[in-house]
Image: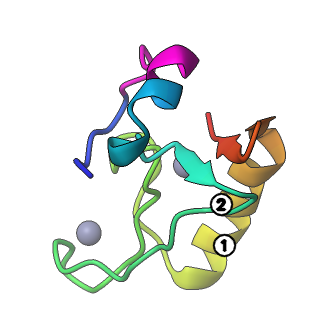
């Protein structure tokens, strides 16, 4: 899976056809992608996998969890998948 940020042109038809390489915003079931502590910041932080560091500043775990919950609440269920936006 490639890490792309801000590919909002991705559409649902493609998501269905390319099941093997789903976009990061498409998660099987009702789930969020895991967030990992990064090694790119001066002190390890958590990045939003959807937003990219330019939009959502890397932050600590408690903050990223709140942020990710916000994504989850806005997500759209599509068959067996959850589409985040
Ligand atoms: Zn970082
Ligand atoms: Zn985000």
Q: Quadrant of the C terminus?
A: top right
| x, y percent for residue 43 | 26, 85
- Specify the label residue 81 is tagged with: none
**Circle 2: element type:** helix
| x, y percent for residue 50 | 47, 46
Please state the total of marks drawn on the protein image. 2
Q: Which of 72 and 54 is in front in this view?
A: 72
Residue 35, placed above or below residue 13: below
Residue stretch in magenta? 7-14
| x, y percent for residue 24 | 43, 47
Residue holding disc 1: 65
Q: Does the residue labelled 2 lie within 8 Å of ligand 2?
A: yes
Q: Nearer the viewer, residue 25 or 53?
A: 25
Disc 1 crowd rating (10 Å Cα; few below 14, some 14-19, many 20+) is some
Residue 37, placed above or below residue 25: below
**Circle 1: element type:** helix
Is residue 38 left or right of 64 when viewed as pictured?
left
Residue drawn at (37%, 78%) of the image: 45
Q: Nearer the viewer, residue 17 or 8?
A: 17
* Quarter residue 55 falls in: top left
* Quarter residue 75 falls in: top right
Q: Looking at the magenta stretch, what is its main secondary structure?
A: loop
Residue 56, placed above or below residue 68: above
Residue holding disc 2: 68
Q: Between marks 2 and 1, how big is the CA–CA gap?
A: 5 Å
């Amino acid at each position: 899976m490639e890490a792309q940020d801000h590919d909002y042109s991705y559409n649902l038809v493609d998501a269905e056809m390319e099941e093997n390489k789903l976009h990061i915003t498409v998660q099987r079931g009702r789930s969020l992608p895991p967030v990992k502590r990064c090694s790119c910041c001066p002190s390890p932080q958590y990045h939003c996998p959807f937003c990219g560091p330019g939009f959502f500043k890397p932050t600590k775990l408690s903050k990223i969890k709140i942020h990710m919950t916000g994504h989850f609440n806005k997500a759209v269920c599509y068959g067996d998948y959850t589409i985040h936006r």
